[in-house]
Amino acid sequence: MRSEIGVSLGPLHVEQVYEQIARRITQDIRAGLLAPGQRLPSERELARQMGVGRSSVREAIGVLQVDGIVETRPGSGSFVAGDAPERLLAEPSSVLAAHDASPFALLEARESFEPAITRLAATRARRDAFAERLLADMERLSDPTNPDERAIWSEADRHFHRQIGAMTGNPVVVALYEQIAEIMDQPLWRRLRDDSLSEPGRMRVHIAEHRMIYEAVVEGDLEAAEMYARQHIRRVRRYMTLADQAQEP
């Protein structure tokens, strides 16, 4: 009988849909089917051609932007970067190496449980100095085109949601929100979030929603806390889904 002692198998990575799409695009660039400077088909067309959802296409384009393979020009669309073939030749394994979590999968999951967790936080009905400081930081912001303000927003946003989880006083919830905060710090999430905030007024809407969530929690208004949390996540999903609608032909 053959011994299996000492056999070690590494973890199996199941490739996400956006990774498959991004890999297909990089393969076409390597094969010369997509040339430097060439405009990619619209998200709608790519989704139709590949039989996938537009949100997955947006994630694929986002991760290729992060890796410098694709560049997006406001109002014009996404293009193969001029040095994309050289990048792929020099670092063939770098693209998708980090395997960022799908932002849209995260938002789907958050919509399923975050309203209930916010409701739980409201049962404690207490103020939180750190959450108030984060709200104050966000309320000072006004220009989403400013990289420094976007960085402040990104940090305050993910820490605010983590703190709402902490306000439940439940250590399991706190551990869950630590993981969520880590995903919201990944390059792909930050890229798509930055794109979603490019439209005037969107940042101010999110700031107002954060304030409403917090006040409902500290006032112990369970119904309002749950409702505002659900509305906020749905709006984030909608904004991120429609981030580049103006660029579609």
Image (cartoon, rainbow, N blue to C red):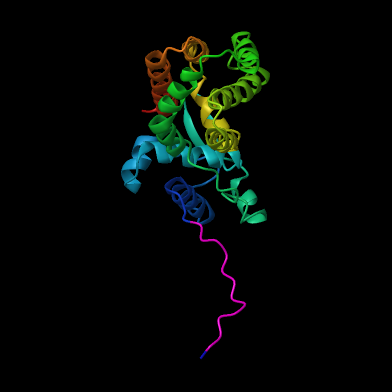
x, y (%) of residue 157? 57, 22
Left or right of residue 62, residue 151 in this image: right
The main secondary structure of the magenta stretch is loop
Vertically, is 140 above or below 124? Answer: above
Residue that lies at the very extreme toward the bottom in this rendered image: 1
Where residue 104 sits, quadrant-wise, is top left
- Kindly identify the residue that appears in the image at 54 percent across and 55 percent down: 30
Where residue 42 sits, quadrant-wise, is top left
* Count of labels in the image: 0
Left or right of residue 102, residue 90 in this image: right
Vertically, is 247 above or below 51? Answer: above
x, y (%) of residue 93? 61, 56
Vertically, is 169 above or below 218? Answer: below
Q: Is residue 72 visible?
A: yes
x, y (%) of residue 81? 58, 40
| Span colored in magenta | 2-13
133 part of magenta stretch: no
Left or right of residue 183, residue 103 in this image: left
Q: Nearest the camera: 33 or 18?
A: 18
Left or right of residue 52, residue 217 in this image: right
Q: Is residue 41 visible?
A: no
8 part of magenta stretch: yes
x, y (%) of residue 148? 68, 19
- Kindly identify the residue that appears in the image at 63 percent across and 10 percent down: 136
Quadrant of the image containing the C terminus:
top left
